[in-house]
Image (cartoon, grey):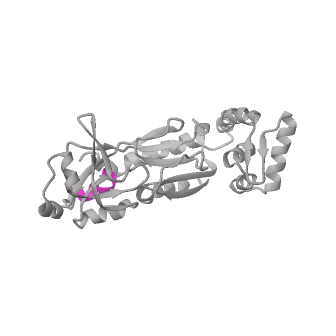
Amino acid sequence: MVFCAVARFSSFKLASKELGMSPAFVSKRVRMLEEQLKVSLFHRTTRRVTLTDEGERLMALSSEILEKLDQLVSESGHSSQSLRGRLRICSSFGFGRNYVGPIIADLVAEHLELQVRFEVLDRVIDPGAENFDLDIRIGDEIAPHLIARRLASNSRLIMASPEYIAAHGRPERLADLSGHDCIAIKERDHPVGVWKLLKDGCEESVNVNDALSTNNGEVAVDWALRGRGILLRSIWDVHEHLSSGRLVQVLPGYSQPANVWAVYPPELRDTRKISTVVAFFKKRLVQLTPISEALTL
């Protein structure tokens, strides 16, 4: 466990902080492991540590070993099914604040020995490279080396306020968007200025006039509600406004798949902690009224 932490963080100091141990203790445990195996597991420099070839081979086996140990303890009858230890989770700003945060609160209430560090980010990350255990992500573009489990269905739709449509007209074709004021969002996987959408299973793209742009989805929705332009936004974020009529869908034949995923590093594949947390998120997202109602729009 100590070896895996040092390998993931490429640092004895960061690993010791994550494990709640002193750096000296972590260094001693790794040195003892190296002496026992009679190999060098890390290349050490003043800035960071990296795995040797032997370390890479050991790392490949470590997750499986730890998972089997975890399963042994769980099935022995001497341990509850409660999760324990540290877990680092990240998500995007809006979805993280409105959905992921509350679900984490329920998760730790059910697993009192679990310690969660939660961060919201405005960019796509590689969870393993940035030392996260789990990324709750919206968007279907996921690097092939990562493990992804779909938690909920979701799409982005094109919409505007009735006031904007009354003042500027309703676009009839996708190409018409180039002549309208559009609100662009630079949020994680969302490219600014180019909208790629599906219609009848075929992808089309359009360059939009991004007169207004932001990296915050909540700001973008507010601008759309104020009649400042046409918006491409996830159903989960705007279902209430679509239901109330404050926003109306335009070009209803078009959508952009943006499902909700649990994304995590391959070394955490099928570990009990991750599989339990992912199942918890999936169950809660299915139960959430906003998500389930939005999908019927």
| Magenta span contains residue 281 | no
State which quarter of the image contains the N terminus: top right
Q: Residue at x 76, y 33 (%)?
A: 54
Number of callouts: 0
Instruction: Looking at the picture, tell me which residue is in the foreground, 2 or 211.
Output: 211
Which quadrant would residue 40 be assigned to in this image?
top right
Q: Residue at x 14, y 61 (%)?
A: 168
Residue 122, how many percent across, how many down? 46, 57
**Left or right: 85 in relation to 209:** right
Instruction: Looking at the picture, tell me which residue is in the foreground, 37 or 203.
Output: 203
Prevalent SS, magenta region: helix
Residue 100, how many percent across, how many down? 46, 54
**Left or right: 30 in relation to 61:** right
Q: Residue at x 74, y 56 (%)?
A: 13
Q: Which residues are magenta?
A: 234-242
Q: Residue at x 60, y 39 (%)?
A: 268
Residue 230, how many percent across, how many down? 24, 57
Instruction: Looking at the picture, tell me which residue is in the foreground, 275 or 5.
Output: 5
Residue 134, how many percent across, how many down? 54, 47
Which quadrant would residue 3 be assigned to in this image?
top right
